[in-house]
Image (cartoon, helix red, strand yellow):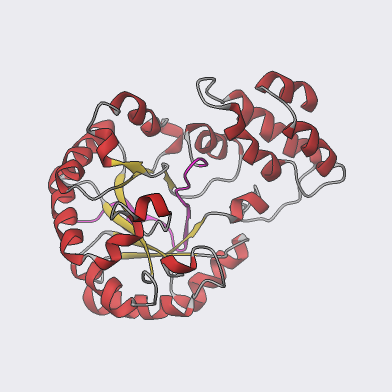
Amino acid sequence: MTNFWQKLPKPFTVLAPMEGVTDFAFRETISRYLPRPDVLFTEFTNVDGLNSNGFEKTIKRFKFSKTQKPIIAQVWGTNPKNFFKSAKIIKDLGFDGIDINMGCPDREAVKTGGGAALIKNTKLVKEIINTTRNGAKNLPFSIKTRLGYDRIVTDEWIGFLLEQKIDAISIHLRTAGQKSLGLANWNELKKVVNLRNRISPNTIIIGNGDVKSYQEIIDKHNEFGADGVMIGRGIFSNSWIFDKQNNKHTPQEYKEILIKHLNLYDPSQNYDTLKKFFKMYINNFKGAKELRVKLMATKNVNEALDLLK
Protein backbone atom coordinates (compact mmCIF):
# COMPACT_ATOMS: atom_id res chain seq x y z
CA MET A 1 0.00 0.00 0.00
CA THR A 2 1.39 3.42 -0.97
CA ASN A 3 1.72 6.13 1.66
CA PHE A 4 2.62 9.80 1.67
CA TRP A 5 6.37 9.06 1.91
CA GLN A 6 6.28 7.40 -1.50
CA LYS A 7 4.36 10.27 -3.08
CA LEU A 8 6.92 12.94 -2.17
CA PRO A 9 9.08 14.45 -4.94
CA LYS A 10 12.69 13.31 -4.95
CA PRO A 11 14.77 14.58 -3.41
CA PHE A 12 12.33 15.78 -0.76
CA THR A 13 13.33 17.81 2.29
CA VAL A 14 12.78 17.21 6.00
CA LEU A 15 13.37 19.38 9.05
CA ALA A 16 14.89 17.13 11.70
CA PRO A 17 13.16 16.69 15.05
CA MET A 18 15.14 18.74 17.56
CA GLU A 19 14.44 18.95 21.27
CA GLY A 20 13.66 22.50 22.33
CA VAL A 21 13.65 23.65 18.70
CA THR A 22 10.91 22.06 16.57
CA ASP A 23 8.07 23.10 18.86
CA PHE A 24 4.72 24.43 17.62
CA ALA A 25 5.84 28.04 17.29
CA PHE A 26 8.93 27.26 15.22
CA ARG A 27 7.13 24.77 12.99
CA GLU A 28 4.38 27.34 12.42
CA THR A 29 6.94 30.03 11.63
CA ILE A 30 8.76 27.92 9.06
CA SER A 31 5.47 26.68 7.58
CA ARG A 32 3.95 30.13 7.13
CA TYR A 33 6.79 32.60 6.70
CA LEU A 34 9.87 30.78 5.36
CA PRO A 35 10.57 28.34 2.53
CA ARG A 36 9.36 25.18 4.22
CA PRO A 37 10.57 21.60 3.99
CA ASP A 38 8.35 18.90 2.53
CA VAL A 39 8.00 17.15 5.91
CA LEU A 40 8.05 18.37 9.52
CA PHE A 41 8.62 16.45 12.76
CA THR A 42 7.62 17.23 16.32
CA GLU A 43 10.18 17.28 19.13
CA PHE A 44 10.88 13.76 20.37
CA THR A 45 8.34 12.83 23.03
CA ASN A 46 8.57 10.13 25.66
CA VAL A 47 5.92 7.40 25.45
CA ASP A 48 5.93 7.00 29.24
CA GLY A 49 5.05 10.66 29.66
CA LEU A 50 2.10 10.20 27.30
CA ASN A 51 0.81 7.35 29.45
CA SER A 52 1.25 8.71 32.97
CA ASN A 53 0.18 11.52 35.25
CA GLY A 54 2.31 13.76 33.03
CA PHE A 55 -0.09 13.37 30.09
CA GLU A 56 -1.57 16.88 30.21
CA LYS A 57 1.88 18.47 30.07
CA THR A 58 3.29 16.04 27.51
CA ILE A 59 0.39 16.13 25.03
CA LYS A 60 1.02 19.84 24.42
CA ARG A 61 4.11 18.81 22.45
CA PHE A 62 1.76 17.30 19.86
CA LYS A 63 -0.07 20.52 19.04
CA PHE A 64 0.03 21.23 15.30
CA SER A 65 -1.88 23.14 12.63
CA LYS A 66 -3.06 22.14 9.15
CA THR A 67 -0.37 24.45 7.76
CA GLN A 68 2.29 22.13 9.19
CA LYS A 69 1.11 18.99 7.40
CA PRO A 70 2.51 16.55 6.50
CA ILE A 71 3.78 16.28 10.05
CA ILE A 72 5.24 13.29 11.87
CA ALA A 73 5.00 12.68 15.61
CA GLN A 74 8.29 11.38 16.96
CA VAL A 75 8.39 9.29 20.14
CA TRP A 76 11.02 7.51 22.18
CA GLY A 77 11.21 5.10 25.10
CA THR A 78 11.55 1.40 25.87
CA ASN A 79 8.11 0.18 27.00
CA PRO A 80 6.33 -1.66 24.13
CA LYS A 81 2.90 -1.29 25.78
CA ASN A 82 3.33 2.47 25.97
CA PHE A 83 4.42 2.56 22.34
CA PHE A 84 1.18 0.79 21.44
CA LYS A 85 -0.95 3.27 23.41
CA SER A 86 1.02 6.26 22.14
CA ALA A 87 0.59 5.12 18.53
CA LYS A 88 -3.19 5.05 19.03
CA ILE A 89 -3.10 8.59 20.45
CA ILE A 90 -0.99 9.82 17.52
CA LYS A 91 -3.30 8.24 14.97
CA ASP A 92 -6.39 9.74 16.64
CA LEU A 93 -4.79 13.20 16.67
CA GLY A 94 -4.50 13.13 12.88
CA PHE A 95 -0.74 13.02 12.37
CA ASP A 96 0.55 11.88 8.98
CA GLY A 97 2.94 9.37 10.48
CA ILE A 98 4.70 8.11 13.58
CA ASP A 99 8.46 7.96 13.99
CA ILE A 100 10.54 6.24 16.67
CA ASN A 101 13.81 7.78 17.74
CA MET A 102 16.51 5.12 17.85
CA GLY A 103 19.46 7.44 17.43
CA CYS A 104 19.50 10.10 20.13
CA PRO A 105 22.89 9.96 21.91
CA ASP A 106 21.75 12.08 24.87
CA ARG A 107 22.99 10.51 28.09
CA GLU A 108 19.62 10.77 29.83
CA ALA A 109 17.89 8.89 27.00
CA VAL A 110 20.63 6.29 26.59
CA LYS A 111 20.89 5.38 30.26
CA THR A 112 17.22 4.33 30.23
CA GLY A 113 17.89 2.02 27.27
CA GLY A 114 16.13 4.36 24.84
CA GLY A 115 17.35 6.47 21.92
CA ALA A 116 20.63 5.20 20.45
CA ALA A 117 20.89 2.47 23.11
CA LEU A 118 18.22 0.55 21.17
CA ILE A 119 20.80 -0.08 18.45
CA LYS A 120 22.29 -2.67 20.82
CA ASN A 121 18.94 -4.34 21.62
CA THR A 122 17.35 -5.71 18.46
CA LYS A 123 15.08 -8.07 20.40
CA LEU A 124 13.40 -5.13 22.14
CA VAL A 125 13.39 -3.11 18.92
CA LYS A 126 11.45 -5.82 17.12
CA GLU A 127 8.87 -5.91 19.91
CA ILE A 128 8.56 -2.11 19.87
CA ILE A 129 8.10 -2.08 16.10
CA ASN A 130 5.37 -4.73 16.23
CA THR A 131 3.42 -3.10 19.06
CA THR A 132 3.72 0.37 17.51
CA ARG A 133 2.40 -0.92 14.21
CA ASN A 134 -0.52 -2.57 15.94
CA GLY A 135 -1.42 0.68 17.65
CA ALA A 136 -0.90 2.88 14.59
CA LYS A 137 -2.83 0.55 12.26
CA ASN A 138 -2.21 1.90 8.70
CA LEU A 139 -0.42 5.08 9.77
CA PRO A 140 2.98 5.38 8.01
CA PHE A 141 5.75 4.20 10.32
CA SER A 142 9.35 5.37 10.29
CA ILE A 143 12.53 5.22 12.36
CA LYS A 144 15.29 7.78 12.89
CA THR A 145 18.63 6.26 13.78
CA ARG A 146 22.41 6.30 13.29
CA LEU A 147 25.03 4.10 11.63
CA GLY A 148 25.79 2.35 14.91
CA TYR A 149 26.32 2.91 18.61
CA ASP A 150 30.08 3.11 19.09
CA ARG A 151 31.10 1.79 15.66
CA ILE A 152 29.58 1.61 12.18
CA VAL A 153 27.39 -1.48 11.77
CA THR A 154 25.43 -0.55 8.66
CA ASP A 155 24.94 -4.10 7.36
CA GLU A 156 23.85 -5.53 10.70
CA TRP A 157 21.77 -2.66 12.10
CA ILE A 158 20.25 -0.97 9.04
CA GLY A 159 19.88 -4.38 7.41
CA PHE A 160 17.89 -5.55 10.44
CA LEU A 161 15.61 -2.50 10.27
CA LEU A 162 15.02 -3.02 6.56
CA GLU A 163 13.95 -6.59 7.25
CA GLN A 164 11.12 -5.11 9.35
CA LYS A 165 9.77 -3.40 6.20
CA ILE A 166 9.77 0.10 7.70
CA ASP A 167 8.05 2.76 5.54
CA ALA A 168 10.95 5.21 5.92
CA ILE A 169 14.31 5.28 7.70
CA SER A 170 16.17 8.51 8.49
CA ILE A 171 19.87 7.98 9.14
CA HIS A 172 22.16 10.46 10.84
CA LEU A 173 25.38 9.41 9.16
CA ARG A 174 27.46 9.22 12.32
CA THR A 175 27.60 6.78 15.21
CA ALA A 176 25.99 7.67 18.53
CA GLY A 177 29.47 7.91 20.03
CA GLN A 178 30.39 10.65 17.60
CA LYS A 179 27.36 12.75 18.52
CA SER A 180 27.90 15.73 16.18
CA LEU A 181 31.68 15.42 15.96
CA GLY A 182 33.63 14.69 12.80
CA LEU A 183 32.20 14.60 9.31
CA ALA A 184 28.99 12.77 8.48
CA ASN A 185 29.81 9.59 6.55
CA TRP A 186 27.67 10.01 3.43
CA ASN A 187 29.54 7.20 1.66
CA GLU A 188 27.73 4.77 3.97
CA LEU A 189 24.45 5.92 2.46
CA LYS A 190 25.36 4.21 -0.80
CA LYS A 191 25.60 0.96 1.15
CA VAL A 192 22.24 1.69 2.81
CA VAL A 193 20.57 2.31 -0.55
CA ASN A 194 21.98 -0.95 -1.93
CA LEU A 195 20.72 -2.82 1.14
CA ARG A 196 17.31 -1.21 0.69
CA ASN A 197 17.13 -2.19 -2.96
CA ARG A 198 17.87 -5.78 -2.04
CA ILE A 199 15.90 -6.20 1.20
CA SER A 200 13.00 -3.74 1.19
CA PRO A 201 12.59 -1.84 -2.10
CA ASN A 202 9.60 0.19 -0.86
CA THR A 203 11.42 1.69 2.13
CA ILE A 204 12.23 5.38 1.74
CA ILE A 205 15.80 6.36 2.73
CA ILE A 206 16.53 9.80 4.21
CA GLY A 207 20.09 11.00 4.81
CA ASN A 208 21.04 13.43 7.57
CA GLY A 209 24.27 15.20 8.48
CA ASP A 210 26.25 18.36 7.64
CA VAL A 211 23.93 19.69 4.91
CA LYS A 212 23.96 23.49 4.79
CA SER A 213 22.31 24.50 1.51
CA TYR A 214 19.60 23.45 -0.92
CA GLN A 215 22.23 22.71 -3.56
CA GLU A 216 23.79 20.17 -1.19
CA ILE A 217 20.41 18.45 -0.94
CA ILE A 218 20.42 17.97 -4.72
CA ASP A 219 24.03 16.82 -4.63
CA LYS A 220 23.40 14.21 -1.88
CA HIS A 221 20.50 12.82 -3.87
CA ASN A 222 22.48 12.61 -7.10
CA GLU A 223 25.69 11.24 -5.62
CA PHE A 224 24.50 8.93 -2.85
CA GLY A 225 20.91 8.05 -3.80
CA ALA A 226 19.09 9.60 -0.85
CA ASP A 227 15.34 9.76 -1.51
CA GLY A 228 15.17 12.68 0.90
CA VAL A 229 17.53 14.82 2.95
CA MET A 230 16.97 15.83 6.56
CA ILE A 231 18.42 19.06 7.90
CA GLY A 232 18.89 19.84 11.58
CA ARG A 233 21.58 22.28 12.73
CA GLY A 234 21.87 23.71 9.20
CA ILE A 235 18.68 25.72 9.75
CA PHE A 236 20.51 27.77 12.38
CA SER A 237 23.12 29.00 9.91
CA ASN A 238 20.61 29.64 7.13
CA SER A 239 16.94 30.36 7.89
CA TRP A 240 16.16 30.13 4.17
CA ILE A 241 17.95 26.81 3.69
CA PHE A 242 14.93 25.24 1.97
CA ASP A 243 14.78 28.05 -0.61
CA LYS A 244 15.33 26.44 -4.00
CA GLN A 245 16.24 29.81 -5.55
CA ASN A 246 18.87 30.72 -2.93
CA ASN A 247 17.63 34.33 -2.89
CA LYS A 248 19.34 37.08 -0.91
CA HIS A 249 17.46 38.62 2.01
CA THR A 250 17.55 42.01 3.67
CA PRO A 251 18.16 42.66 7.39
CA GLN A 252 14.53 43.79 7.63
CA GLU A 253 13.33 40.42 6.30
CA TYR A 254 15.35 38.65 9.00
CA LYS A 255 13.86 40.89 11.67
CA GLU A 256 10.33 40.41 10.39
CA ILE A 257 10.63 36.63 10.60
CA LEU A 258 11.80 36.86 14.21
CA ILE A 259 8.90 39.20 15.01
CA LYS A 260 6.43 36.68 13.59
CA HIS A 261 8.07 33.90 15.61
CA LEU A 262 7.94 35.97 18.81
CA ASN A 263 4.23 36.61 18.25
CA LEU A 264 3.62 32.84 18.14
CA TYR A 265 5.42 32.28 21.45
CA ASP A 266 3.46 30.44 24.16
CA PRO A 267 3.68 32.58 27.33
CA SER A 268 3.49 29.44 29.49
CA GLN A 269 6.99 28.52 28.26
CA ASN A 270 10.27 29.77 29.69
CA TYR A 271 11.21 32.86 27.66
CA ASP A 272 14.89 31.90 27.66
CA THR A 273 14.05 28.92 25.44
CA LEU A 274 13.33 31.41 22.65
CA LYS A 275 16.77 32.97 22.77
CA LYS A 276 18.39 30.13 20.83
CA PHE A 277 16.55 31.43 17.77
CA PHE A 278 18.03 34.94 17.94
CA LYS A 279 21.27 33.83 16.29
CA MET A 280 19.31 32.00 13.61
CA TYR A 281 17.38 35.06 12.48
CA ILE A 282 19.70 37.90 13.48
CA ASN A 283 22.70 36.80 11.48
CA ASN A 284 24.54 37.43 8.21
CA PHE A 285 24.00 41.20 8.05
CA LYS A 286 25.78 44.34 9.24
CA GLY A 287 24.93 45.17 12.85
CA ALA A 288 23.49 41.69 13.53
CA LYS A 289 25.93 40.91 16.33
CA GLU A 290 25.19 44.13 18.21
CA LEU A 291 21.43 43.64 17.89
CA ARG A 292 21.73 40.02 19.00
CA VAL A 293 23.60 41.02 22.17
CA LYS A 294 20.77 43.41 23.05
CA LEU A 295 18.14 40.77 22.32
CA MET A 296 19.90 38.25 24.55
CA ALA A 297 19.62 40.73 27.44
CA THR A 298 15.83 41.04 27.12
CA LYS A 299 13.60 39.51 29.76
CA ASN A 300 10.36 39.02 27.85
CA VAL A 301 8.78 39.06 24.39
CA ASN A 302 7.62 42.68 24.62
CA GLU A 303 11.16 43.90 25.28
CA ALA A 304 12.42 41.95 22.27
CA LEU A 305 9.64 43.29 20.03
CA ASP A 306 10.43 46.87 21.07
CA LEU A 307 14.07 46.36 20.00
CA LEU A 308 13.00 45.06 16.61
CA LYS A 309 10.70 47.96 15.73
For the C terminus, the quadrant is: top right
In front: 202, or 116? 116
For the point 73% across and 39% down, the residue is: 254
Residue 6 is one of the magenta-drawn residues: yes
User: For the image shown, how many numbered marks are present on the structure?
Assistant: 0
Whether residue 309 is visible here, answered yes or no, is: no
Quarter of the image for residue 165 reads bottom left
The boundaries of the magenta stretch are: 1-21
Residue 174 placement (x, y as % from top left): 46, 70
Residue at x-position 19% and y-position 41%: 82
Left-right relation of 59 to 134 = right
User: Residue 211, how many percent across, how many down?
Assistant: 57, 63
The quadrant holding residue 136 is top left
Residue 108 visible in the shown view: yes
Q: Is residue 280 above or below residue 149?
A: above
Q: Is residue 289 left or right of residue 164?
A: right
User: Quarter-wise, where is residue 168 in the image?
Assistant: bottom left
x 75%, y 30%: residue: 297
Residue positioned 47% across, 80% down in the render: 187
Query: Percent position (x, y) of residue 126?
Result: 16, 61
Q: Nearer the viewer, residue 71 or 149?
A: 149
